Amino acid sequence: MSDFTIGESDFLLDGAPFRILSGALHYFRVHPDSWADRIEKARLMGLNTIETYVPWNAHSPRRGVFDTAGMLDLDRFLRLVADAGMYAIVRPGPYICAEWDNGGLPAWLFREPGVGVRRNEKQYLAAVSEYLEQVLRIVRPLQIHEGGPVVLVQVENEYGAFGDDQVYLKAVADMIGQAGITVPLVTVDQPVDEMQAAGGLSGVLRTASFGSRSAERLQTLRAHQPTGPLMCMEFWDGWFDHWGGPHHTTSVEEAAAELDALLAAGASVNVYMFHGGTNFGLTNGANDKGVYRPTITSYDYDAPLDEAGNPTAKYHAFREVIARYAPVPADEVPAAEPSPEFEVTLGEPISLLDRGPWVEHESLPTLDELGTRLAIYRTAVDIDRPALLEIGEIRDRAQLYLDGHPLGTLERENHDRAILLPRARGKLDLVVEDQGGVNYGPRIGETKGIVGPALLDSAPITRWATCAIDLDGIPSLWSSITGAADPSPGPTAWRAVFELGEARDLFLRTNAWGKGIAWVNGFCLGRYWRRGPQETLFVPGPAVRAGNNELVVLELDTLPDRVARFVSGASLGPLEL
């Protein structure tokens, strides 16, 4: 058993000064069978601590549920950290940002009438209390004084960029304490006077988030906290990407120099990210600061460990910097070997446009009400001439078909809300996709799907049928359907079987396809989109096996190339556009 406290100028481990050298590693972005590998590589870089967020919405897709299976097994993750002889920082939110869908807040939360998110409002606080009780039940016995690895727990996340409700912050801190957490609590905000003032809490250690001008920003933090250790809780060593934008990287030399300046000042650090991992499934977030931009599937982040967990030039540069201030293990991390290259033909297409089941509605339901991220909205139109279709708002993308023939696409990113139908008689289908919940700012938790009325030549369309696509069930479609069909317009599932001599990390090249989602052996790799920048999907080795494997692709647009190409490494796109 050990003791971890906050001293006059240092963290204290059993009474002795202790510098936290931490790296961000999100268990929910890494296959669980790879957790130990990533943790060990953090240790070999010279880190002594692992930090992770906790995504409320992933653990609790429905109220009253708290899932800890597979990639959500926080207990197993923290115990692996302890097994490696390292410490842990847990940041349970309830809001985490993290370029994660809805910033980690569950969609069901926003369906409560009058709920006041991230403020002192009783419905919200009641839900937060239920959540924190569940997650901290896992963390409580793993605190350092109980023999576990956890040394710090964070209250909220960058709250000063959102609000200044000190009553709310204190309520969250009190809930954490009431759940039995007795290790020190911290807050984090950017080193801006207004944010530090609004997001800090009396009696709780303030930390900062930044990636440059370390000395200046530590000085700002010190101005708001005259005593106690200085810590950069998010040392930004890279950045994330949006669909349609460039791939972001940062200078290895400049990032290493900033880390050196930070450590030379005596500060503790959490490298964000040490290893970014992947937004598997449909977990990516989005930003909307006037233009909606969803985050890509890869969360490589230009981190010291790349998306597949391989050391980069930044890894070795950071290791050299850390060695100036702390002991670094002598063991070297082996260089990555290229992944196998091969091709397999996609076949057995199954069209989803006419599968059903269909539910009738007198008004337009949202995707939230349908309980899905992808749905087909169908109506009959009967105007034998061109007519203008207007939609209140599309969140986030709708592809239109008339009697099965493509008409065009309405994109939220382009602020599209209307399309001229060349003929308005027949069966009108809208394939509507939620491309990721906004994770930062006032639009967190917004409704998804078709929002507002649908008008045809200014007259409301009142009769609709919907088909909510069960995305989890896509890989099993072939178990109930036999025989190949001719491909048709609209969302279509494709399948291929390939053989491997051994389980290996793979990279699936997707830039010759349109837009869609891919699975290997039922494991959802995430979204792909021809617009880039990302051109490959990472396939974690533990998701494949020696022998036969199954690839399933749901193409929402057009699949001009019906060959799946596995390539030797990642391709995350151009650095400039």
Image: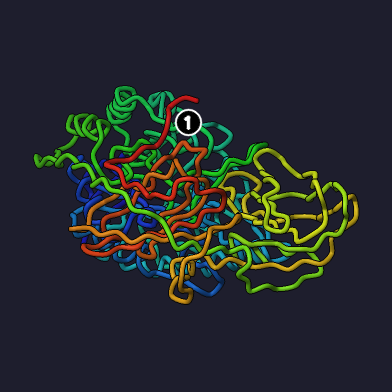
Residue 35 appears at what percent x and percent y? 27, 56
Q: Residue furthest bottom?
A: 480
- Vertical comparison of 404 with 314: above or below: below
Count of all numbered marks drawn on residues in the image: 1
The part of the image, by quadrant, that contains residue 70 is: bottom left
Does residue 60 appear to the left or right of 328 in the view shown? right
In front here: 377 or 67? 377
- Vertical comparison of 325 with 437: above or below: above
Which amino acid type is shown beneath numbered disc 1?
A: Pro
Q: Quadrant of the N terminus?
A: bottom left
Give the residue drawn at x 63%, y 74%. 357
- Vertical comparison of 65 with 523: above or below: below
Type of colouring: rainbow
Residue 495 shows in the view: yes
Residue 204 appears at what percent x and percent y? 45, 49
SS at badge 1: loop
The part of the image, by quadrant, that contains residue 370 is: bottom right
In front here: 314 or 190? 314
Does residue 19 appear to the left or right of 155 in the view shown? left
Residue 329 appears at what percent x and percent y? 12, 41
The part of the image, by quadrant, that contains residue 73 is: bottom left
Give the residue drawn at x 30%, y 60%. 543
Q: Which residue is mark 1?
A: 246
Residue 275 appears at what percent x and percent y? 32, 44
Does residue 117 appear to the left or right of 182 in the view shown? right
Residue 447 shows in the view: no
